[in-house]
Image (cartoon, helix red, strand yellow):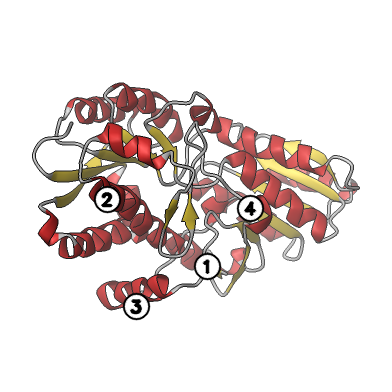
Amino acid sequence: MTSGRDIYIPILADAAWLTSDGAFINGVQLAVENLNSEYSGKGFTIKTAVIDDKALYETGVEEATKLAEDSAVTAVFNLQNFDVSKTTADILAQGRKLTLFPYGAYDSIFTKDNPYLFCGVPSFSDLGRSMAGYAVDQGYKRIAVYHNGKQSQEELVMAFELELLNTGTKVVDYVPSIASENEFDSIYSRWQALDVDCVVISQYGLERAFEVLKMLRSRDKEIAVIGEPIFNRANALAENIEIAEGMVVPSTLVIEKSEKLKTFEEQYRQKYGTEADIWAVQGYDMTRLVVDTAIELDTNDPDKIAKELHDPKGYLGIGRHIAFTKGGAMITDVKRLPILICKDGIFK
């Protein structure tokens, strides 16, 4: 059990990456402020801090080990590189720390029925199925898939192609890497010869994702493009507003309008001077998920909170219902997962 009556939720991430956009950490900080105000009479103090792994594997493992051994930690938000989080998930779970992955992690992590691990977004397989459903609905027939070979991208595109079986829509080309502009010229020529009418871009790494999109748009401004949610980052979109116009991505949240959501959006606007995006909502909801559950149970014990999060009734956030499978994957109705279209630098 954690010490005292503190509920301490550190955020384990590359600090430079986390703060470059700021939406998620802003949502967390607003939640902490509201929760400390709402629950001031309950005897709990809610705290958070950014634990910087500097995007380094060794540092990430070292910091996760410290958190796993820290009795003050109730839960950890793990926003590390997926290759790092594949290791640190086990470290944190062995330390009996409630560990949430607000931006996701490899699907395989959530197939082991580990009671301490929870995914805060739909699985990559769910995202792939959602993207395939959209492609079929739009009438695309011949699709080229670019993916960079990461396990998460393989999980996504495998589910994407399987969902296309017996639909009349098919993948006609896979591209696992693009070494140069010259190589892309030959790839694009092949796509023209194959009569490709839609390109799927599944790339781990935001900067590289937009580089690939830029190469494609420099050859064809009109072809349909379906991307994974990595493209939906406000700062990056502002810098790539022209090439992103018209592309689509699946949302990672099924958000329904509510008074709680409206109140949050107004608070966020007043505090930060900008509109709350889905990652701001995610930061707020993930924090309240842990703390509201802890307060309801009157405990900061990760074991008890983790057990409650597995309750089938789930948790009602500010604009959505959150529930998890036995293994900690987020339960998602793929058919309700919105497809967002980029217009004027905003996916909506």
| In-image side of 199 versus 73 (left or right) | right
> CB atoms at circles 4 and 1 under 8 Å apart?
no
The answer to whether residue 37 is above or below residue 188 is below
Q: Position of residue 337 (x, y in %)?
A: 62, 56
Dot placed on the residue nearer the N-terminal end, 3 or 1: 1
> CB atoms at circles 1 and 2 under 8 Å apart?
no
Q: Nearer the viewer, residue 122 or 41?
A: 41
Secondary element at tag 3:
helix
Secondary element at tag 4:
strand
Q: Quadrant of residue 117?
A: top left
Secondary element at tag 1:
loop
Secondary element at tag 2:
helix
Dot placed on the residue nearer the N-terminal end, 2 or 4: 4
Q: Nearer the viewer, mark 3 or mark 4?
A: 3
Residue sitting at 49 percent across and 49 percent down?
206
Identify the residue under disc 1: 256
Q: Amino acid at mark 3?
A: Glu
Distance in Å between CA atoms under marks 1 and 2:
24 Å
Dot placed on the residue nearer the N-terminal end, 4 or 1: 4
Identify the residue under disc 2: 296
Q: Amino acid at mark 1?
A: Glu
Residue sitting at 32 percent across and 72 percent down?
268
Identify the residue under disc 4: 227
Distance in Å between CA atoms under marks 2 and 3:
26 Å
Distance in Å between CA atoms under marks 4 and 1:
23 Å
The answer to whether residue 246 is above or below residue 132 is below
Q: In the rendered view of the protein, which quadrant contains the N terminus?
A: top left
Identify the residue under disc 3: 266
Q: Position of residue 99 (x, y in %)?
A: 34, 36
Distance in Å between CA atoms under marks 3 and 4:
30 Å
Distance in Å between CA atoms under marks 3 and 1:
16 Å
